[in-house]
Image: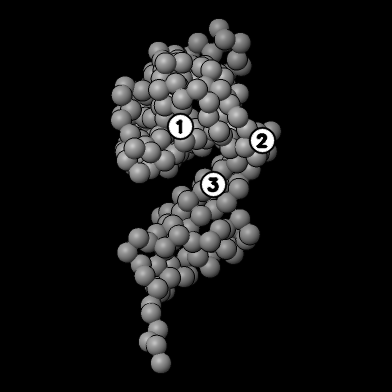
């Protein structure tokens, strides 16, 4: 469904001057998408070829940057990469420092009306990013592997989880921990679902990859999506008779 949106409608996401610079007076949208980089390596902006320019999700979580200062457009139409509806909230190595700072701040959870520091931390994304829910049709959080204290916050904020997994033993073990954690969150009343488990970097001709894929499907059934082949894999061509 396409709807006509004035740039002024998004002034709380991006400062009006920048909106008009990128969007013009009106924009035809099929729904805005916000990509939040929740990995301190900051690969999202780098992969999309955009300069964060000081925007940082860690600063937003600490309350030092407003969302309107940190969300940047990913459109690079002038370079041949038109992404008119994609926006990015980038990360940097500052994210880990921000997490440590927030973990220390959580000691004062009772001052904000929470029952525990874990509850305070679990709600941090909801408190800092609630405006994004109002302004974007879809929000994607790109998270590093791991189940630290902020995994609760991610699962509490997200509605569905897409779990990538490489077909090897260690990655399979990590995926099992991740899916078990999500299911434990469901039992606690958190409204999150496992949408898809996506096998990645697959080499279909390798026996180990086929065995791992079979085990993955045996464990998770229809939740397992079609595998993404490794970048250097090419299907074997049959000779033309």
What is the crowding at mark 3: few (fewer than 14 residues within 10 Å), some, or many (at least 20)?
some
Find residue 23 and name its label.
none
Find residue 191 and name its label.
2
Residue 12: x %, y % from top left: 52, 16
Point 57% across, 10% down: residue: 112
Query: In this figure, which residue is indicated by the disc labeled 1?
Result: 87
Q: Considering the image in quadrants, where does the N terminus appear?
A: top right
Q: Nearer the viewer, mark 1 or mark 2?
A: 1
What is the crowding at mark 1: few (fewer than 14 residues within 10 Å), some, or many (at least 20)?
many
State the residue in front, 89 or 209. Answer: 89
Residue 217: x %, y % from top left: 57, 63
Badge 1 marks a residue whose secondary structure is strand
Badge 3 marks a residue whose secondary structure is strand
Q: Nearer the viewer, mark 1 or mark 3?
A: 1
Point 42% across, 30% down: residue: 73
Asked whether residue 148 is in view, the answer is no
For marks 1 and 2, the one nearer the N-term is: 1
Using the image, determine if residue 185 lies above or below residue 56. Answer: below
Spatial CA span between label 3 and label 2: 15 Å
Residue 205: x %, y % from top left: 40, 74
For marks 1 and 3, the one nearer the N-term is: 1
Spatial CA span between label 1 and label 3: 19 Å
State the residue in front, 231 or 127. Answer: 231
Query: In this figure, which residue is indicated by the disc labeled 3?
Result: 162
């Amino acid at each position: 469904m396409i709807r006509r949106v004035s740039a002024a409608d998004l002034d709380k996401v991006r400062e009006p001057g920048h909106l008009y610079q990128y969007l013009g007076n009106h924009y035809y949208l099929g729904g805005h998408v916000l990509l939040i980089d929740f990995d301190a390596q900051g690969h999202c902006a780098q992969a999309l070829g955009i300069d964060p320019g000081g925007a940082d999700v860690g600063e937003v979580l600490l309350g030092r940057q407003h969302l309107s200062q940190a969300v940047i457009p990913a459109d690079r139409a002038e370079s041949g990469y038109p992404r008119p509806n994609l926006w990015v909230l980038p990360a940097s190595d500052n994210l880990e420092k921000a997490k440590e700072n927030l973990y220390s701040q959580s000691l004062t959870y009772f001052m904000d009306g929470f029952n525990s520091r874990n509850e305070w931390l679990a709600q941090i994304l909801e408190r800092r990013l609630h405006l994004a829910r109002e302004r974007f049709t879809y929000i994607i959080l790109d998270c590093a592997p791991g189940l630290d204290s902020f995994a609760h916050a991610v699962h509490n904020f997200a509605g569905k989880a897409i779990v990538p997994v490489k077909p090897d033993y260690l990655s399979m073990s990590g995926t099992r921990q991740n899916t078990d954690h999500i299911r434990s969150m469901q039992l606690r009343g958190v409204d999150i679902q496992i949408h898809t488990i996506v096998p990645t970097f697959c080499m279909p001709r390798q026996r180990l990859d086929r065995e791992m894929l079979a085990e993955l499907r045996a464990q998770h059934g229809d939740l397992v999506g079609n595998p993404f082949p490794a970048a250097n894999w090419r299907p074997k061509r049959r000779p033309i008779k």
